[in-house]
Image (cartoon, rainbow, N blue to C red):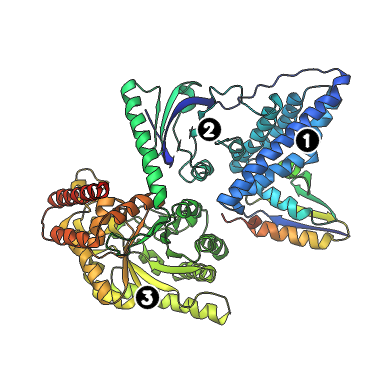
């Protein structure tokens, strides 16, 4: 199963280290292979280093791709996490 | 002598340890293939040590401050376990036959290239976090991880441009006496950590790393925000004396922590804290305040590009309410205008902003924004004891209107079956003379009063205290102000409600003494003043406070009143000391 979705970054700090850590923790709960793309650069969804290098700040649109048995759920949960500003109180 | 921002109280004297921007020098060393396995092992053990260090500080932050604040350390730990990070370094060591330092440096450089593509300045700033993590690992490589060879002595004062959360992982309370940074404000991460470790700190001292040298003798006065490098003998002697006093005072004050706030003749005074940021709760709890008497909610609105959502506000309020539970938290609704503005909420330029659209006025002119905040506050009331307070009520109509909106929000929440405390107490601030004069009428409409002395003084004497040519008029002991306070407290008590003072006046011991005498039931002061005010309250009698206040109300000059109070207090405290010695 393969799913993808475009999501806009809405938290002030964007995909910074702490937010990425929260994202990776969530991504690791899924069996699917997860990738995140910003412009032409794609990063491993379960790698904190990779995601941080995407440099996705507030207002940027990224694409979450998942491939695997729980792909649909993974994309849904991860995009919600981004929409919820990674659960941060800003 | 340098002036910075007082971040964590205390006085400390010791040798400087200046940490410059990139203290770690990286040299490339080529290794023979036989040595590679040992080198990889060396790196892994340094990484493990770094993990342990960071794990320790994480636990401490979780315990002292909260899970959210410790998130960054989780990120560090994950990064240290990330195969693209450490794995990449190992690949370089094995592939190019080089030392760990160099390999890590290459990984970092690779990363920096990526970071340079980042257009977002905030994110760019954040990429420094990774640099400091690499520094940590390299630091752990160099020695057995025990002692820092660059440190000037066993104990030292750290002077740095900025301290990242990873740097604080290194802070061993046994060797770090305090610190000074160029960056940061009173609520920066550094300052919070300093307070939680009870290390004196001054932040925001410009250029200090370029003037101070490792080994220089440094004095930090964390109360006044002063740093002295290589003091002359006179200053040094004075500060040694100050430090002695500070330690004595601290010991004495700490003993007061668990004692009740009562006068000698057992008159109870509520002693609560004013806060601006949720992080300050640590200090509030540390000093065992009986509640939060004023939680300024502006922090959540200021420095934002748009209106904070109900959810965001709710989470911040809830965090404080939950931590203080069962002690009460008084949340003041948004107080902007005057000199505080929001980028997404425009107030047209005014001739006289302090006499214009400020405090409850813009709030009542924007009911939706008001309702959003009230919903967030009410929802937080399900998690502890919440009181709501409206700022700067001037006329009865404003209070009626604010209460009406509150009832509407309550009814709406009830309909939607959202949990909140239906008996939440509602109060208003009395900080305008018109409200003080009409306090008897206003008292019938609320559950409590809180006097904002800063504004009450300024509006009573019609003087801006920031304006030097008229600041002589701005005096908390102005007799008209004292009469107004007395009037407010009489009106409150007649209506059977309590009255607190949450202005700066409450935090000065001699003024606190007078306020008790004027009938004030609760003093809400800055978290760090709690114990010194408690000390005063426990050393005087209510009867003496009443007599002194009566006497003060008969005088017509602030200067005379001040002398009178100080003389009385001196006599009382001296008599008490003598009595104790007998």
Relative to B558, is B536 on the left or the right?
A: right
Mark 2 or 3 closer to N-term? 2
- The number of numbered discs placed on residues in the rendered structure image is 3
Please provide percent x and percent y for residue B6: 41, 40
Quadrant of the image containing the N terminus of chain B:
top left
Q: Which residue is drawn at 70% across and 48% down?
A: A21
Verify CB contact (< 8 Å) between mark 2 and mark 3. no
Residue under label 1, please give it. Answer: B86
Q: Which residue is drawn at 65% across and 21% down?
A: B25
Residue under label 2, please give it. Answer: B176
The relative height of residue B332 versus residue B277 in the rendered view (above or below) is below
For label 1, the SS is helix
Question: Residue B164, located in which quarter of the rendered image?
Answer: top right
Residue under label 3, please give it. Answer: B401
Badge 3 local density, few (<14 within 10 Å), some, or many (20+)?
Answer: few
For label 2, the SS is strand
Question: Residue B398, located in which quarter of the rendered image?
Answer: bottom left
The relative height of residue B388 versus residue B225 in the rendered view (above or below) is below
Badge 2 local density, few (<14 within 10 Å), some, or many (20+)?
Answer: some
For label 3, the SS is helix
Please provide percent x and percent y for residue B109: 71, 29
Give the alpha-carbon distance from disc 2 to disc 3, as whole Å.
54 Å
Between disc 2 and disc 3, the foreground one is 2
Relative to B395, is B340 on the left or the right?
A: right
Between disc 2 and disc 1, the foreground one is 2
Q: Which chain carries label 2?
A: B
Please provide percent x and percent y for residue B418: 57, 76
Between disc 1 and disc 3, the foreground one is 1
Q: Mark 1 lies on which chain?
A: B
Mark 2 or 1 closer to N-term? 1
Q: Which residue is drawn at 14% across and 51% down?
A: B564
Mark 1 or 3 closer to N-term? 1
């Amino acid at each position: 199963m393969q799913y993808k979705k475009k999501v806009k970054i809405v938290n002030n700090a964007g995909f910074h280290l702490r937010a990425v850590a929260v994202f990776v923790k969530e991504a690791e709960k899924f069996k699917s292979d997860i990738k995140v793309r910003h412009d032409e650069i794609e990063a491993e969804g379960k790698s904190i280093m990779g995601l941080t290098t995407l440099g996705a700040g507030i207002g940027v649109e990224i694409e979450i791709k998942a491939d695997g048995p729980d792909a649909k759920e993974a994309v849904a949960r991860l995009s919600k996490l981004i929409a919820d500003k990674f659960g941060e109180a800003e | 002598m340098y002036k910075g921002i007082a971040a964590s109280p205390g006085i400390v004297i010791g040798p400087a340890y200046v940490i410059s921007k990139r203290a770690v020098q990286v040299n490339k060393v080529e290794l023979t293939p036989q040595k590679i396995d040992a080198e990889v092992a060396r790196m892994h053990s340094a990484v493990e040590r770094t993990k342990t260090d960071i794990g320790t500080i994480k636990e401490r932050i979780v315990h002292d401050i909260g899970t959210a604040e410790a998130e960054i350390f989780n990120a560090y730990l994950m990064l240290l376990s990330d195969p693209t990070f450490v794995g990449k370094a190992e690949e370089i060591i094995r592939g190019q036959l080089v030392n760990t330092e160099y390999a890590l440096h290459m990984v970092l450089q690779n990363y920096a290239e990526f970071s340079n593509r980042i257009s977002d300045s905030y994110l760019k700033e954040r990429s420094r976090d990774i640099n400091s993590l690499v520094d940590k690992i390299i630091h752990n490589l160099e020695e057995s991880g025990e002692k820092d060879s660059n440190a000037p002595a066993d104990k030292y004062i750290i002077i740095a441009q900025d301290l990242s959360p990873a740097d604080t992982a290194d802070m061993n309370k046994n060797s770090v006496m305090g610190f000074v940074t160029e960056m940061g404000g009173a609520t920066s991460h550094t300052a919070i950590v300093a307070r939680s470790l009870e290390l004196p700190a001054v932040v925001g001292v410009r250029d200090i790393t370029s003037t101070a040298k490792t080994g220089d003798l440094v004095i930090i006065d964390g109360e006044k925000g002063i740093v002295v490098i290589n003091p002359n003998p006179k200053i040094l002697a004075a500060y040694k004396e100050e430090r002695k006093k500070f330690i004595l005072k601290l010991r004495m004050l700490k003993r007061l922590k668990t004692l009740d706030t009562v006068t000698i003749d057992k008159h109870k005074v509520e002693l609560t804290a004013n806060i601006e940021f949720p992080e300050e709760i640590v200090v509030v709890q540390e000093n065992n305040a009986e509640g939060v008497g004023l939680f300024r909610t502006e922090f959540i609105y200021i420095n934002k590009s748009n209106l904070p959502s109900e959810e965001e506000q709710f989470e911040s309020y809830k965090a404080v309410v939950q931590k203080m539970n069962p002690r009460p938290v008084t949340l003041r609704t948004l107080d902007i205008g005057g000199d505080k503005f929001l980028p997404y909420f425009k107030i047209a330029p005014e001739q006289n902003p302090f006499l214009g659209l400020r405090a409850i006025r813009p709030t009542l002119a924007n009911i939706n924004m008001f309702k959003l905040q009230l919903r967030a506050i009410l929802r937080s009331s399900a998690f502890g004891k919440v009181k709501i307070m409206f700022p700067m009520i001037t006329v009865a109509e404003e209070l009626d209107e604010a209460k009406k909106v509150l009832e509407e929000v309550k009814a709406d929440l009830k309909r939607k079956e959202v949990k909140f405390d239906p008996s939440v107490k509602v109060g208003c601030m009395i900080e305008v003379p018109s409200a003080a004069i009409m306090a008897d009428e206003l008292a019938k409409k609320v559950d409590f009063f809180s006097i904002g002395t800063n504004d009450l003084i300024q509006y009573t004497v019609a003087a801006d205290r920031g304006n030097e040519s008229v600041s002589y008029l701005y005096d908390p002991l102005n007799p008209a102000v004292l009469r107004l306070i007395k009037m407010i407290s009489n009106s409150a008590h007649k209506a059977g409600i309590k009255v607190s003072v949450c202005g700066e006046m409450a935090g000065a011991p001699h003024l606190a003494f007078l306020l008790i005498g004027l009938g004030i039931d609760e003093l809400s002061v800055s978290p760090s003043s709690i114990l010194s005010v408690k000390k005063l309250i426990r050393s005087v009698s209510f009867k003496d406070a009443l007599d002194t206040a009566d006497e003060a109300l008969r005088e017509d000059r602030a200067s005379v009143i001040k002398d009178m109070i100080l003389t009385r207090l001196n006599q009382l405290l001296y008599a008490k000391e003598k009595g104790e010695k007998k």
